[in-house]
Amino acid sequence: MPSPSPAATPTGHRVAAPPVTVIVGSEELLVDRAVSGIVAGARQAGEPAEPALGSGGPDVHEVRAADLLPGQLASLTAPSLFGGGCLVIIRSAQDASKEVAAELDRYAAAPPPDVLLVLTHAGGAKGKALLASLVGQGAQRISCPAVTRFGERLDFLRSEFDRAGRKADEAGLRALLDAVGTDLRDLAAACAQLADDTTGVISQAVVTRYYRGRAEATGFTVADRAVEGKLADALEQLRWALATGVSPVLIVSALAQGVRALGRVGSASRGKSAEALAVELGMPSWKIDRVRQQLRGWTPDGVARAHRAVATADAQVKGEGASAGYALEVAIGAIVACRSGR
């Protein structure tokens, strides 16, 4: 994220430049961090160049664009009687009314001194004209795109551990995703906890010990054991997963993904590298290597029958069966049987 540079103002205070910043994106954690960074920078820059001119740090006002009435922007950005400047944060600028959007547009054309205006925008089509106009008039744009791909989440985890001065290996990162899920706030909190509570490289073993049953009893672990033909291990992990609150729907989804991966990798060219297939199939290369190992003992017919078993379990878990746990046990047994050719 670009760092605002301090600039002296006519009142002798230093405020961060540029005067207008638009933070664009739907990833709330990253948006909040960008806002916090600007606020912190403004407060740090707010130390007066001449002590007699007042106390440091701007007044901070925050409002949602949908709640902002015509005319209120002028009062929010009015200079303080006691000096020190002000910082106005307007959330969800795409929801601003037509009149307020016009006021924001006029403000950006000639922003007053001693004031910082920070807007957040979801980045969609709504309010796109306002966003384009603000940026066109010189507003700083900070992008916070959604983190959706597996590789992007791994990069996020690496950056979190780097921030904490810690290192994690690839297996540890994957185990943390399995244990915690994909929500960035949960992942950030988990990284902070592991950084504070553990020592050394954060590996799969470290994550598993820290989360105990949670990291080792996810739906993906159940699926891995099932497609590998390890019936007892798969059933044990299933019981742990259900006991620790993992949804049966998520487990059957993991089973479906595991069997689907067998079909996709199994039907792909064996002469291609994992990296080349990763681009073709949209899967990480490490997963392709794992699936290739899991394919031992599978035939195309067996994969097809496993697909049908998972489809049956999916219907039963979602209401057609009396017991979701029993349906999952039957599905796991069927998958193992399909692998062995029975």
Image (cartoon, rainbow, N blue to C red):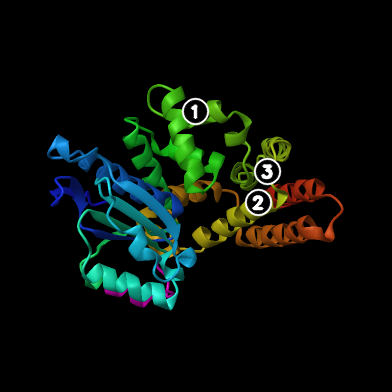
Instruction: Provide the secondary structure element on which disc 1 rests.
Output: helix
- Residue 285 visible in image: no
Percent of width and height locating residue 159: 34, 41
Percent of width and height locating residue 151: 40, 51
Q: Which mark is residue 250?
A: 2
Relative placement, left or right, of 34 versus 183 is left
Q: Which mark is residue 246?
A: 3
Inter-mark Cα distance, 1 to 3: 21 Å
Is the C-beta separation of discs 3 and 2 under 8 Å? yes
Instruction: Provide the secondary structure element on which disc 3 rests.
Output: loop
Q: Nearer the viewer, residue 15 or 303?
A: 15
Residue receiving disc 1: 205
Question: At label 1, which amino acid type do we have?
Answer: Ala
Inter-mark Cα distance, 1 to 2: 24 Å
- Local crowd at mark 2 within 10 Å, few (<14), some, or many (≥20)? some
Farthest residue to the right: give it: 322
Question: At label 3, which amino acid type do we have?
Answer: Val
**Dot 1 or dot 2, earlier in sequence:** 1
Q: Is residue 184 magenta?
A: no
Question: At label 2, which amino acid type do we have?
Answer: Leu
Q: Nearer the viewer, residue 133 or 158?
A: 133
Span shown in magenta: 122-133
Image height of 121 relative to 221, above or below: below
Q: Residue at x 28, y 74 (%)?
A: 133
Q: Residue at x 34, y 72 (%)?
A: 103
Inter-mark Cα distance, 3 to 2: 7 Å
Image height of 103 relative to 270, above or below: below
- Residue 219 visible in image: yes
Instruction: Provide the secondary structure element on which disc 2 rests.
Output: helix
